[in-house]
Image (cartoon, helix red, strand yellow):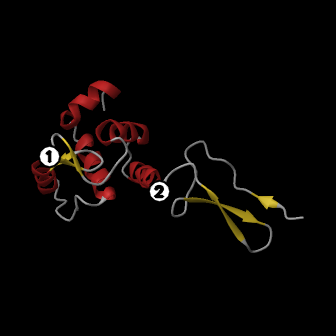
Amino acid sequence: MSRYILPPEPSNPPETISGLKMAIISGTSLSAISSPLSVNETILWEESQRLDYSYDTLYSLWGCEAQWRHEGIFGDNYLAYGAFQWHFQSWEFYTRILDRRDFNILSFKDQIDLTILVLQRGDWWNWKNCAQKIGSF
């Protein structure tokens, strides 16, 4: 009979490795158990922790702005791109003033990071409609 040894459950979302929660099975084998977080939610979690910003706020903003999509131009009559509905002029403005010219608007991680950096500046009005729906940032 195999004995399963699971790590203690964290109070926050589970530790993940490439989007999967890992369990150690006695001996040397490993077994993957699906994480309750999708790969994109895991990226959002990791970036929110790395940049010290509320995962819940980002997740709510993502849902409000893009219904949890992260690719494509679909908002504001096809003028806004990605998870946080960036207008290209706004993207260029913030990447320039925050000296993040290496950020790529096509990268979900970069979309998250720039959004956090802008929100940390207090520039929440970029998402004023969602701010009213989900509360202040």
Q: Residue 67's spot in the image, x, y percent?
A: 35, 41
Q: Residue 30's spot in the image, x, y percent?
A: 70, 69
Q: Residue 65's spot in the image, x, y percent?
A: 29, 39
Q: State which quarter of the image contains the C terminus.
A: top left
Q: Residue at x 12, y 53 (%)?
A: 97
Q: State which quarter of the image contains the N terminus.
A: bottom right
Separation of marks 2 and 1 at Cα, in angstroms: 26 Å
Q: Which mark is residue 105?
A: none
Q: Residue at x 36, y 39 (%)?
A: 63
Q: Is residue 135 visible?
A: no
Specify the amino acid type for callout 2. Val
User: Camera-side residue: 106 or 47?
Assistant: 106
In the image, is residue 79 above or below residue 43?
A: above
Q: Is residue 112 visible?
A: yes
Q: Mark 1 = which residue?
A: 79
Q: Which mark is residue 39?
A: 2
- SS at circle 2: helix
* Horizontal arrangement in the rendering, residue 108 relative to residue 3 (left or right): left
Specify the amino acid type for callout 1. Leu
